[in-house]
Image (tube, grey):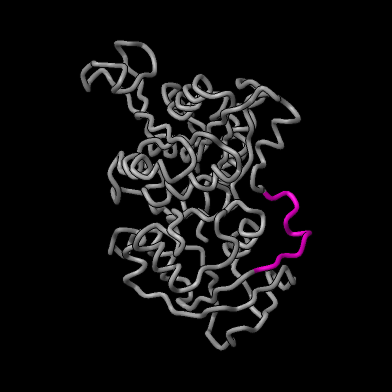
Amino acid sequence: MIHISPENFLDLRYLASGVFYPIDSFMSYDEYVCVVKDMRLLNKAIFSLPISLEVEHLNYDIGSKQDLYYDDTLVGFISISDKFKIKKEHIFELYQSKDEKHPGIIKENLKSPYRVAGSIEIKEEFLKGSLYKNFLQDHFKKINKNVKTIAGFQTRNPIHKAHEHLQRVALELCDALFINPLVGWKKEGDFSENAVMKAYEFMLEEFYPKNRVVLRGLQTAMRYAGPKEAVFHAILRRNIGCSHFIVGRDHAGVGTYYGNYEAQDLAKAVEKDLGISILALKEPYYCKKCNELVSEKTCSHKENEKIYISGTKIRQALKNDELPSEFMMRKEISNVILSLGKDNIFIKEN
């Protein structure tokens, strides 16, 4: 019997539903190392983050079939084909950092280093409501048969003016937009799932075309692995049914661990192997002289004319029960978030 973590329970669902294609089982040691070092599976298919099953010990027999329990409920089974201990060097290589203050490294250090691999089964009732391979094709067959191209958008924040700008650009380029906020584990101080989803629900209801925009949460943990996680996010959206994927500034980054456009550079470098087109869009900002949202590609004005859309300033205003500047976030969205109450806007210690 193995008691699995919340993160591994979500992984189990996506392994079974095809969202993590081409993998459908927890990784062996050799596969784990290959992914960490080369962003490739053993069969050479691209995959940029390891998916492994954390256990408390390695006292399991290779070839045995173990029950998987989550919250004291039997959710599935694993047929064990490998067992191993991950090394510190693998964690550092995964996050491209040796800084123990990196939130991804902090989280990895809190986990058991022991892992088991093997093919999985899941009880059918635990797949209900989960995203699955080619979900979007099935969805648009019902509401808009003219949709051929779909841009995916990853976020962990409520919608602000910069993200709205990127989404509207994508709607001009593609037939539809899939807004897919990550609603699994996030670090303390990030926006809560409720704040993110309520803001987007209001946006779709009031501002976006209903037959061209879909909102669903992505139930997996945030890794804060920067460029490698951007590639991982692209793979998942390809599997769900997107033809295009938006990679913005510092995608999946945190602090100053990764360069502003490092994620775009990596995603574009492996684009031919991804099976999805990368929309590498520049950071939008408000130009006082242009009097609208622009980017470095469309505006030549000096730095003192620019108002950058700062997530830090938005969070600080909301923490103080204040409306962020309308240059940064629509007041209607700010009011939706503030209506939740201070205790429900941000993630507390977890």
Q: Position of residue 263 (x, y in %)?
A: 35, 43
- Residue drawn at x 67%, y 42% as measured from the top left: 135
Residue visible at 53% across and 84% down in the picture = 57
Residue range corresponding to the magenta coloring: 120-130
Residue 71 vs residue 238, the one in the foreground: 238
Locate the N terminus and report the quarter of the image it occupies.
bottom right
Q: Position of residue 140 (x, y in %)?
A: 69, 31
Left or right of 304 on screen, residue 134: right
Q: Is residue 207 on the magenta stretch?
A: no
Q: Residue 93: name its quadrant.
A: bottom left
- Residue 177 lies, with reference to residue 186, above or below; the image says above
Image location (x, y in percent) of residue 344 = 59, 46
Total numbered labels: 0
Q: Nearer the viewer, residue 268 or 185?
A: 268
**Which residue lies at the image location 53% right of the left edge and 30% below the top edge?**
334
User: Which residue is situated farthest in the right direction here?
Assistant: 125
Determine whether 125 is above or below 89 in the image.
above
Please give the name of the residue rendered at 72% of the width and 73% of the height, measured from the top-left corner: 72
Residue 128 falls within the magenta-colored stretch: yes
Instruction: Look at the picture and state if 199 lies above or below 41.
Output: above
